[in-house]
Amino acid sequence: MVDAGVYYPVIPRKPVMPISLILSLIALGVAPASWGQPNPRNADWAVYLGDKATSHYSRLDQIDRSNVTRLRPVWTYETGEKGEFQSNAIVVNGVLYTATTSRKILAIDAVTGKQNWMFDPAEHRPGNQGRRQRGVVYWASGADRRIFTGAGPYLYALNAATGKLIPGFGKNGSVHMGEGVETYGAAAPSVVINTPGSIYKDMYIVGGSTNGPGTIRAYDVRTGRLRWLFNVIPRPGEYGYHSWPPEAYKTAGGASNWSGLSLDEKRGIVYVPTETAGPDFWGADRKGANLFANSLVALDANTGKRIWHYQLVHHDLLDKDLPAPPVLLTVKQKGLTIDAVAQGAKNGLLFVFDRVNGEPLWPVHEVPIPQSELAEEPTWPTQPVPDKPAPLTRQTYTIDDVSNISPAAREATTMRFRKGGSHGAYPAPSLKESIIMPGFDGGMEWGGAAADPGGVYYANVNEIPWIYQMIPTRNADGRPVSAGERAYKIHCSYCHGLDRKGDAASGFPALEGIERRSGREALTRVVNGGVGRMPGFGALPEAQRRSIVDFLLGEDRAPATGRGDGPAYVFGGFRRWFDPEGYPAIKPPWGTLNAVDLNTGELKWRVPLGEYPELTARGIPPTGTENYGGPVVTAGGLLFIGASADETFRAFDKDTGKILWKAKLPFSGNATPSTYMVNGKQYVTISAGGGKSGRPAGGSIVTFALPD
């Protein structure tokens, strides 16, 4: 599934036109038909994740199984920034475009690594720009060539040649993405693009993270005018409205599309995966299935009208967002050729549908799950599980899964398991700790999956247990805690922990002792406007925002205002479960790379992805590591992937899973790589920023090629 705008190095033999005829044609003002066509020795990676089908596939085959061991770094670009550099660079006409950690946009010569230009959104709008941007979008019509990017709540249009804002787009080059969303008296929501959208005809279709209700929007690429909008949280009269309380559409938030989308350009269908509705772990105020949260939604790309949908998690209480864009591919079953769409889930489940009508290719069953122990937090009775393919991760933690990497690890994990137990992927809301497996970061993650033309699907997954627990927001006697502590628990403890110690492995900083490091003015600015990956809480009443700051500074005195003030329970925070040495508290593998034949639904191969050298030195086979960032598959028979927590870039044989080549990176390559050709030479490039899994952070772009 390769975008029609990408050209590959097939060099046909053509008769040479005599120079006399060429000169005659020029004199008559006529050019040969081949003039102006792309150079067949060039192959762009012009779309995020390779093509609009998000297949991560390239037909380039200059680098193949026979010569990949000769691959060498040819240039490295240092952004000067640190952490979670997740951009899948696009390459057009020999220029690489990418987004840095701070959302600067770079245009770099794709052969030499020299910078052409840089756009810094902070120069136009100081303040929080957001982080973790995974790519940009390119559009061209004749001489009009544009780069679309997001920073803060704004969508920007840049001149691809200069990096300058295009004045005729929106207001002086940008559009506030919250404008046009009905909020019933509240301020326009903040919408931040983590993952780029897709171009269809003359529209840019995109979702984004939001502190308001989720929407999918299509903008005119020339003017920035909003052409259509789809409400992910339905309004009265819209399909799905009755899956919510009657007034929820006025107050509910989330259910947005932060993980990207895919496009069947020929049919004009856009496929949109969505996240949970907010609050992620409290659903008493949004009883019902909550369409179209946690759903794959097929929309008419011309109008934004729903064609079909499938909800993969009903009434989500466990942050089980659909974490990656779906993959469009073609499979053969029972003599029929089927255009399909494959959607991975945090549970490690893979759902495959007919792309046109939404029918599952294999039966999906509603399976009972453990029910809530908290009367105020009801659980949906069942969740969907497909017959095929088999889950790519373990679906629960059993006594057979206790760690075996050392006697101490075995003892510690055995004791913890016997004390708390595990109820799999859907533990019941409870005040008791439970092991959740797969964990909150999957299973599948935002790096996405690759697919080749043969119908084989390639995905890397995590196999790491986490701890789940709900915490009361009131004292044991029912009296409310202080206003600031309650507001902190409800809005901040997810990430920074009830003890304010944060989670370095997830990138959540500690707030313990922050009164010694920061003052009221700085804290107020962050709480109101956000910083980095943290959203602003400007939509909260000022009194609540002030009480959070009071609590963090140790100046919180006011009591909360009774039992109705927010949820009765909050999530106890994101906690990976580690053994005494700091390794995942489960028998390896901890991260794997998988190939699934979607013609049959059967697993083709599975191998560990990543290793800890210190464990290998102890005689322990490669365990795999926590991994973020996706693979790229090529016609050369190769699968390229970074992702692992050992700062290594690898090439696998796509048919067997055998490692054919690897190279050290300066930081972990937590991004999907790109491959392209310029002047007959194939390159492979990856963003290497680390910062995940507690690893060192930086900001490098590392590019490889075969020696001349």
Image (tube, rainbow, N blue to C red):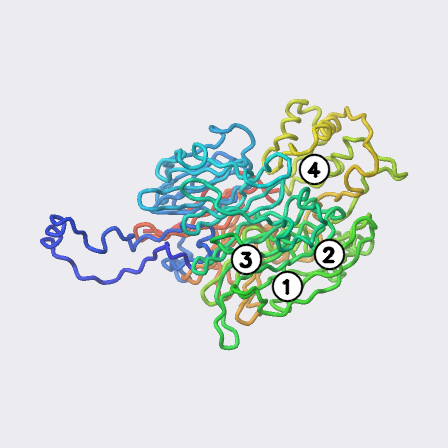
Which badge, 3 or 1, is on the more N-terminal residue?
Answer: 3
The answer to the question of whether label 4 and label 3 lie on touching residues, with beta carbons closer than 8 A, is no
The N terminus: image quadrant: bottom left
Q: Quadrant of residue 116?
A: top left
The residues bearing labels 2 and 4 have C-alpha atoms spaced at a distance of: 23 Å
Q: Nearer the viewer, mark 2 or mark 1?
A: 2
Where's residue 322, x and y in %? 61, 53
Q: Nearer the viewer, mark 3 or mark 2?
A: 3
Q: Which mark is residue 496?
A: 4
Mark 1: few/some/many CA within 10 Å (<14, 14-19, 20+): some
Mark 4: few/some/many CA within 10 Å (<14, 14-19, 20+): many
Q: Amino acid at mark 3?
A: Ala
User: Which residue was labeled with disc 3?
Assistant: 298
**Vertically, is 275 above or below 180?**
below
Which badge, 1 or 4, is on the more N-terminal residue?
Answer: 1
User: Which residue was labeled with disc 1?
Assistant: 391
Mark 2: few/some/many CA within 10 Å (<14, 14-19, 20+): many
Residue 411 shows in this picture: no
Q: Which mark is residue 519?
A: none
Q: Which mark is residue 426?
A: 2
The residues bearing labels 4 and 3 have C-alpha atoms spaced at a distance of: 36 Å
Where's residue 459, x and y in %? 55, 58
The residues bearing labels 3 and 1 have C-alpha atoms spaced at a distance of: 24 Å
Q: Amino acid at mark 1?
A: Pro
